[in-house]
Image (cartoon, coloured by chain):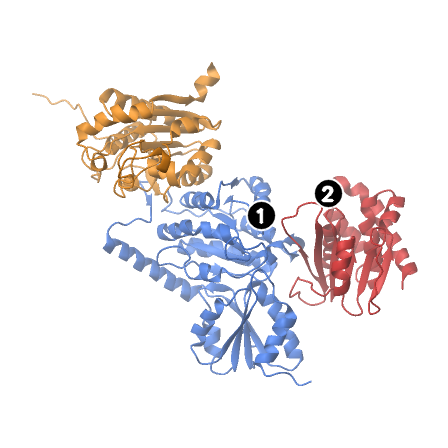
Amino acid sequence: MSMKTVFERTSGLTETQTHYCPGCTHGIIHRMVGEVLEEMDILEDTVGVASVGCSVLSYEYFNCDMTQAAHGRAPAVATGIKRVLPDRFVFTYQGDGDLASIGIAEAVHAAARGENITVIFVNNAIYGMTGGQMAPTTLIGQKTATTPFGRNAAVQGLPIRVSEMLSTLDGTAYIERVSTHDVPNIIRTKKAIRKAFETQKQGHGFSMVEVLSSCPTNWGLDPSESLDWIKDNMVPAYPLGVYKDSQKEAGQ
Amino acid sequence: MEEILIAGFGGQGVMSMGQLIAYAGMNEGKYVSWLPSYGPEQRGGTANCAVVVSEEQVGSPLVSRPSTAIVLNNPSYEKFEPLVKQGGLLVVNASLISKATERSDIKVLNIKATEHANVLGNPKVANMVLLGAFLEETGILSDESILEALKKVLSPEKHSLLGINRRALELGRSLAGNVKI
Amino acid sequence: MAKVLMKGNEVIAEAAVHAGCKYFFGYPITPQSELVAYMARRLPEVGGVFLQAESEVAAINMVYGAAGTGVRVMTSSSSPGFSLKQEGISYLVGAELPALIVNVVRGGPGLGNIQPAQSDYFQVTKGGGHGDYYTPVLAPSTLQEIIDLTEAAFEIADTYRTPVILLGDGMLGQMMEPVEFKDLTEREPGQKEWATTGTRGDGKPRTITSLDLNADALEKRNEHLQKKFAMIRQNEVRYETYETEDADYIVTAYGTAARIAMNAIQKARKAGLKIGMIRPITLWPFPEQPFIETRDRVKGYLSVEMSAGQMVEDVRLAVDGRAPVSFFGRTGGVVPAQEEIYEQIVNISGGVEV
């Protein structure tokens, strides 16, 4: 009987075992980024920027040169790298606390400048690493360690829709929101990541993929319930789709 | 050591006048420094700069008691007239300042610089008329060094203005001889 | 090259270009804005990149990114903006990235004012950001010296893989003085095997990070840094002395305060007082040696600063109680006059015979 290979580890990731919690979709998103870098054959031309939060150790998982940035500053660090090495691929991998809270200025201005970088923005509506506190993307009514009675708009304000907001900036080239709650959406996620790196390859400017992701540990749900929670609660608040495709718009 | 304070409204050429003196001093192998007053006001406010021309290394570029003050407007006159060192020099643009000093321990040159500059054809060279008077009185730098400096300070497309600047300097020198107190 | 008359801020910028720095990320703040503007015009001429960042925080992190690729890179600011860069400086130290950070100090605390001051001495010499670290600090006192020290700063940064601070003040930044540059020569950028530039066939991916979740590993990293700091202490101390051999009293000052104090000392010498001067050029590592050599024979020291008394603490440590140390300073952006320093000198030395 001959054996047929049906599944292989991507060379885009190292063999280091990740520290992510069971059921967390960071692993899937890492894998898809790694696969895209491998398939585009750009691993050796890529410098990634890890952020602060659960994905802080992503520099140990991506199989390319990596730099670890201060909290929220990954787009500024990426800018520094890209401005010195415009022919390399530069991406950031940031969570919602990192990008939408402390690092919103750096994200907005990198986008406004049209920095030719790719931002992978993982939105799970909560701070994971620090133990489940409110994020800028936490939903109204959602309970977290710092909104124990549920997020109240009158007290904690309203969630930020980052893709919608950044897509208003003329400097952005490609912005899409995708999700990881089922296989068809995961496949769409990979396509979006590919599209974002292709956008960078063509030199069109700032690209971002916002990936809705789960946090079973801090949501207090099991992995399967978590995926349902994305579908039932996050997707309605954060509609999926392409928010900006400057090339398509230019072609029309 | 000559410690010079030049003050007036922004736009009167106060800063560039100071730079000319510093440049010319440098060209003559002297130690020089130039320090501007700097603040939030960008236009219209009173500006001043301090210039030191010395045979020795300049310590402080700040000038609190000038050996010469060149003043181009009333607020500057009021501020710096009392600060001029004993035996020092006060050069006044008498076209714009009507006050007369009561000090008898300093020399004063009252020059109607703006009117003379208008006669020359450009009110902007009033500062050069005053500079000429200052040079005549102190003798610290030659006209050649100043004009050489002017070539560096003026952008090449403005070199057509060298002629009128030279005439303004010369006029200032001759006026200094006539108005001495 | 011939002598030119330039503003201090512009001298720093041109000196950096001469030192092979082609990358600048900064944010406007008085009194250093001319440096930013000069770079905006100058760097494209040498094939470099100037970028105005959205904040000082972004600027220092852009520097971090660029430094990680191995190039010579810098940023500049003034006190409030420099405070904002502290987190980034700590990261640069932790990740061992070379860079030049210029602080053209102004009066503080808080928004303070825009006049010259030396009140950031503690901040720059005692670490400044979080964690156990020091950064080398170079403090020029003339515009010509800025040229030499900017070059030295980049050399130290590359040699030890560390950020280096060039400390000026509003007066040095704003004043003009003649300077002479050497001819600009194209430099071959040195290859840095640790730089993250894309692996491009040279093996295993590299990582730039200051994170070590394992305490023992982080302690090792700290020990490594401390060894480096010890080497810098041993090799990079710079100072200048003036007539200390026969001095009864020694004035110590750096930067702008030193140039003014020097005139006061010369006046005191003419009046028959035996006064010398120690001028620290590196503020960290602090030059202890000239104090150790003189502390058993002089009658006292006077530290002159544009602060409420910061360097004087390092002077006292170096003198180690073996001679009296007094202090004279002005704060809030007030620059001490030569006359008042002279008076202080006369006072501590018991007056002059008239």
* Shade representing chain B: red
Task: Identify the residue at horizontal 45%, vertical 67% (top origin).
Answer: C286
- Tell which of C258 and A40 is nearer to you: C258
Q: Image quadrant of residue A188?
A: top left
Q: Where's residue A117, x and y in %?
A: 41, 32
Q: For mark 2, does the 10 Å Cα neighbourhood hold few (<14), some (14 to 19), or many (20 or more) residues?
A: few
* Shade representing chain C: blue
Task: Identify the residue at horizontal 43%, vertical 79% (top origin).
Answer: C321
Task: Please give left or right for residue C352 compared with residue A55 in the image.
Answer: right
User: Decide: marks 1, 2 in contact (CB < 8 A)?
Assistant: no
Q: Where's residue C189, x and y in %?
A: 46, 46
Q: Where's residue C126, x and y in %?
A: 42, 61
- Tell which of C193 and C282 is nearer to you: C282
Quadrant where the C terminus of chain C is found in the figure: bottom right
Picture disc at residue C288: none
Residue occupied by mark 1: C33
Q: Looking at the picture, which amino acid does disc 1 mark?
A: Ser
Task: Please give left or right for residue C234 compared with residue B4 in the image.
Answer: left
Q: Is residue C216 above or below residue C39?
A: below
- As measured in the structure, the alpha-carbon distance from the residue carrying label 1 to the one carrying label 2 is 22 Å
* Shade representing chain A: orange
Q: Residue furthest bottom?
A: C353
Residue occupied by mark 2: B155
Q: SS class of the residue under badge 1?
A: helix
